[in-house]
Image (spheres, coloured by chain):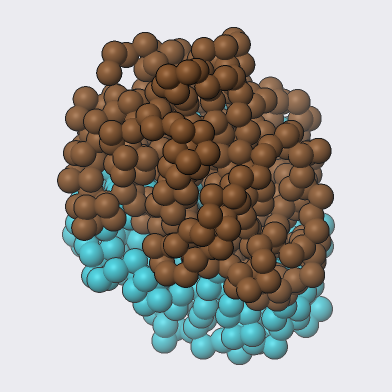
Chain colours: A cyan, B brown
Amino acid sequence: MIENAYYTPEVHGAYELIDVGDLELEEGGVIPGLRLAVATRGELNAAKDNAILVTTWYSGTHEIWTREYIGPDHALDPERYFIVIVNQIGNGLSTSPHNAPGDIAMSRFPRVRVGDDVVAQERLLREHFGIERLQLVVGGSMGAQQTWEWAVRFPDKVLRAAPIAGTAQNTPHDFLFTETLVETIECDPGFAGGEYASNTEVEAGLKRHAKLWSAMGFSTEFFKTEHWRGIGFEDRETLQTAFMEPYFTAMDPNDLLAMAWKWQRGDVARNAGGDLAAALGRVTARLYAMPISEDMFFPPRDCAADAALVPGAEVRVIDSVSGHLGLFNLEATYMPQIDENLRDLLAQEV
Amino acid sequence: MIENAYYTPEVHGAYELIDVGDLELEEGGVIPGLRLAVATRGELNAAKDNAILVTTWYSGTHEIWTREYIGPDHALDPERYFIVIVNQIGNGLSTSPHNAPGDIAMSRFPRVRVGDDVVAQERLLREHFGIERLQLVVGGSMGAQQTWEWAVRFPDKVLRAAPIAGTAQNTPHDFLFTETLVETIECDPGFAGGEYASNTEVEAGLKRHAKLWSAMGFSTEFFKTEHWRGIGFEDRETLQTAFMEPYFTAMDPNDLLAMAWKWQRGDVARNAGGDLAAALGRVTARLYAMPISEDMFFPPRDCAADAALVPGAEVRVIDSVSGHLGLFNLEATYMPQIDENLRDLLAQEV
């Protein structure tokens, strides 16, 4: 257990830690008394049929969703829907390497898969909230991986699904890119095989991590058009030192690596003996795959290839020069596209 | 001076080390008695007007050109042309950090720019071979940077130019990507600020370097289509351990970093007070910009943007799933496209 002031309500806004019991993991092992950090907006109606599940991305929490994506002016409108944002396992707010009990703390944290998250989320919704069906599951990047997994694993429970900037089966290139991200941290002598005393000992590695994220997370066109100006930075260096570096150096290295391991292995085909087409063929949700146009590692064609295997799915490309990190809502034109597509999707009869 | 068996004729084929005298550098300082490693094919005719200059890329030497690009079946035909391949400064065969005299050896090697290479190459061609005009300058990647520089700096000497997979002005994204490449090496404790005793001490860093090259140097589609099979590897891991890792771990870290520094700052606009349009407007060569379709860091649109500033230039996109590293001729469809475009270009009246 490491104290880290970043993983607190003061930084991320209020959330509830909900114990969903022991979680047996696909890779073996168990997380005893798994605690999921959950934030909600809106009210669950009496029929319990107005719920939307939001899943979180690598390094992200519920905070970006409550700040940028959810509100009365958005498709994710708390006046109409009960919106449940569940922080993924390992993200630092839910049970994670840095806050886990000693025998599974730090380098001893077990391997967690996307499917484990989804099983835990389903249990949470059912047992804690009494929710049996979801109007929508939506998430970006690793949140998209969870969204795809939900649609495949629990088709009867998911009426609509909107995986943004993420694939149902992680691609080999994406696996490789994530490997290079992992190495930026693991090669830091301060990482000490995951047994550092504080994340500050791994600062150099986390800064390299932040830089590599910039190289693949934005886009060639983001830099060429100097779009950093559009988000308030005077130059590329300031984007790095005032945004990317503080963002990642605040985080826990083992938490990031737990998520990275999971991200690399996201694959709904595991639900059908490795047959991706069979797995995606099970989806009954109305599904809009929403890749980001300039995404360098979840490019639209990869997302579209997965969507093509889902009956009736549509591909709605989000135009964004910011690339994958456009997910942070870095352009005035971004959120209107998200909202328009989610409104369309939520208006679909199912 | 470090002994490194990689940088020998046994590995790269014969070359001549030609002393072009002292080279004063744009960044200040001087390389005394600069030695350029030069390989030639064909015969210089009596009029000395059948010469083609080939420039080399990051980590590359003349060897890949003599093996893959030059021959009687290629546009670069030694039966018609006198082809001079000049290894760039810092590439390990020409004067480089690992083989330089003590006062400029290793971490003391001065900063070298693309313009310095081109000045040295012009001097070599004129003083050593008596060549005043070139039928063609052609190179890939950093070789493309030198090609652009030649066309801008010596317009009267360059009749035709074919920059393959490279820009005239390096983009900010490309600068950043190269920074992440540099960090894979510099963060290795064995690098010791550039004062290692052998490149083997930096093996871990060089392996990370090789991995990051795979992530950006190939393409998402290369991995998705498992094109490694097409080039003789059974899986992605073997591609890494049997090709990329041996390739880079044989090399000298300081040599790579000298090239990386140069690559980051390639910019023909320096010839016109920072005005890219003015610089490229000076080009009188017939120029075909030949970006590679799936190149992730010299994407076609960036190459096309530079070409648009050159009077009469054409953009000829080379279709290749291999991305930037398609330069290694990894597909049966690659070289025919290169040859067709170079034949077209060489057939152009100038």
User: Looking at the image, which residue is at 68% across and 37% down?
Assistant: B15
Give the answer, above or below, for where A125 lies relative to A304: below
Q: Nearer the viewer, residue A100 or B77?
A: B77
x then y, percent, for residue A282: 57, 30
Query: Is residue B182 in sight in this rendering?
Result: yes
Asked if residue A209 lies left or right of residue B279, the reply is right
Location of residue B116 (image quadrant): bottom left
x then y, percent, for residue B224: 59, 32
User: Looking at the image, which residue is at 49% across and 66% down?
Assistant: B30
User: Looking at the image, which residue is at 40% across and 57% down?
Assistant: B265
x then y, percent, for residue A348: 30, 35
Location of residue B189 (image quadrant): bottom right
x then y, percent, for residue B293: 44, 29
Number of residue marks: 0
Of all residues, the one furthest to the front in this rendering is: B46
Q: Quadrant of the N terminus of chain B?
A: bottom right
Query: Is residue B174 in sight in this rendering?
Result: no
Q: Quadrant of the C terminus of chain B?
A: top left
Q: Nearer the viewer, residue A336 or A18?
A: A336
Asked if residue A196 lies left or right of residue A28, the reply is left
Asked if residue A6 lies left or right of residue A294, the reply is right
Asked if residue B48 lies left or right of residue A89, the reply is left
Q: Nearer the viewer, residue B212 or A174?
A: B212
Q: Nearer the viewer, residue B3 or A328?
A: B3
User: Looking at the image, which residue is at 47% across and 70% down?
Assistant: B29
